[in-house]
Image (spheres, coloured by chain):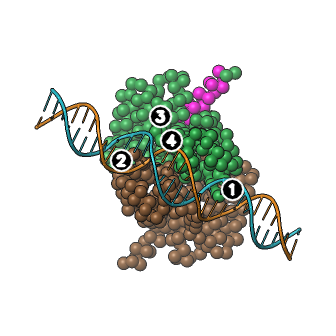
Chain colours: A brown, B green, C cyan, D orange
DNA sequence: CCTTCTATTTTGTAGTACAAATAGCGCACA
DNA sequence: TGTGCGCTATTTGTACTACAAAATAGAAGG
């Protein structure tokens, strides 16, 4: 269920490679990349392809190029941290508990509010999508199927808010759940324990009860957070 | 105080131009752009520069290119709506009250939570930044100076959360406040009325009172929201 | 009617040449 | 000795050409 990240284009590969390097901290902010000609040669691509890759990275706020000065990595404040790629790169290079905590904190802020808003404004169509996702979760036989349905559930709730800006935060939730599943997969426990939480959220949204929906979602995320902490403790204990 | 958007590069201009066209809806999602050769000719740039611009747009999720098929505008769901450029383009093309409402809704979710988190975790350094911004607001003589200080205040609070993901949401707040100032500038009223709100937030964060900070910030945003609505009503009345 | 193969179109990559900006050096001059 | 000015070397930016690769649509064949 890991992210496929299938890239057929050459410059796409370069984007991934450089992105990982930068976000992973191998090239520190303020530092300069080698000049284009060199870097292109070193990565065995043409300068053309390299430059297209660099434009992508600069669009995500990671780098900044100026004539004569060269191309340098920008301070992390300027990075588009909410960009799906950037999140993925961080997650790949630095899956520290610290970062996971930050992801969960975001969920705690976003999701209860989104659930409440969805309870107020969701359309019938959107309610249907939520219910379909729930049904898929209930029917899921494998962890993969469950994961997919779970993501669909949370995305459907976001759509229910009628606010595209909210929906764009799905990348954060996706990343958070992704690393969560990665943790819980190791313990191989039954993954269905959170189904009741989902039901409460769904019901509240159906009945248009914003505050009930908010609290149910809040509990769901809090539960997930404490699970993560438990896993982290277990891992630390196993290491010692 | 409008956004400068100074772009010295050619492809940067092309990015702006195409970005505005797409986000403004002139080219609808699902629709194809003219083929590169044609488009390059039409925009009077080389194919090279055009392609670099398109890579930027595809990095922001706006378009998607495939061989033989061409380049098409993606569904809005895939757009990085939280990207500063995308927000600016939306704001430029579609400053409808509808969109402003969505921005405010985001603020209502983010900022009270951020204020609470800052009250818990801010460092002395970060507190100082908040206080400096407040001082600058208090001393501001012009709307421009006030605007700048106000933005600095809200950014400083976000930094206090110690969560880069939160900080990245500053683009949303910046855009929201930007269009707010644009509205309130027309009525030319005194812009300092929200200073007491800011003081309450600052004090609560200094005293490490999360819930007080949350409520104070919530009131600030709510106040701003009702102001926006009043302005909208006034404008509607003036039109009729 | 369906399958398969081919031809054509469009983006992707490579390479060359030159333009433009600018940091840093060196020189002239006070 | 210090200070300012201009030159030059370096690095990115743009243009153009040529060809590679993918994938659609259409033709040919079963």
For this rendering, which residue is in front, D20 or D13?
D20
In the rendered image, the vertical position of residue A124 relative to residue A93, given as above or below: above
Chain under callout 2: A
Is disc 1 placed on a helix, strand or loop? loop
Res. B69 mark = 1
Few, some or many residues within 10 Å of mark 1 (<14, 14–19, 20+): few
Q: Earlier in the sequence, mark 1 or mark 3?
A: 3
User: Disc 4 designates what residue?
Assistant: B10
Q: Earlier in the sequence, mark 4 or mark 3?
A: 3
The residue range painted magenta reads: B223-238
Q: Residue, x 72% and y 49% (percent of image)?
A: A123
Is disc 3 placed on a helix, strand or loop? loop
Res. A69 mark = 2
- Between the C-alphas of marks 1 and 2, the distance is 38 Å
Q: Residue, x 61% and y 73% (percent of image)?
A: A143
Count how many numbered circles sit on residues in the image: 4
């Amino acid at each position: 269920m890991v992210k496929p990240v299938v890239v057929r284009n050459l410059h796409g590969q370069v984007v991934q490679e450089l992105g990982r390097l930068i976000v992973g901290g191998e090239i520190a902010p303020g530092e300069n990349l080698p000049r284009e000609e060199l870097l292109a040669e070193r990565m065995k691509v043409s300068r053309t392809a390299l430059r297209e890759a660099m434009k992508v990275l600069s669009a995500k706020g990671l780098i900044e190029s100026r004539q004569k000065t060269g191309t340098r990595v920008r301070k992390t404040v300027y990075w588009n941290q909410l960009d799906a790629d950037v999140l993925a790169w961080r997650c790949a290079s630095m899956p520290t508990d610290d970062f996971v905590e930050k992801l969960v904190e975001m969920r705690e802020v976003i999701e209860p509010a989104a659930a409440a808003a969805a309870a107020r404004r969701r359309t019938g169509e959107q309610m249907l999508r939520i219910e379909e996702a729930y049904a898929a979760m209930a029917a899921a036989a494998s962890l993969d199927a469950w994961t997919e349905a779970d993501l669909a559930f949370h995305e459907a709730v976001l759509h229910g808010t009628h606010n595209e800006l909210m929906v764009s935060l799905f990348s954060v939730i996706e990343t958070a759940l992704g690393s969560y599943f990665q943790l819980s997969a190791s313990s191989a426990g039954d993954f269905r324990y959170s189904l009741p939480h989902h039901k409460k959220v769904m019901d509240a949204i159906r009945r248009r009860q914003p505050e009930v929906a908010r609290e149910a979602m809040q509990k769901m995320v809090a539960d997930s957070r404490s699970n993560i902490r438990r896993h982290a403790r277990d891992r630390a204990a196993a290491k010692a």
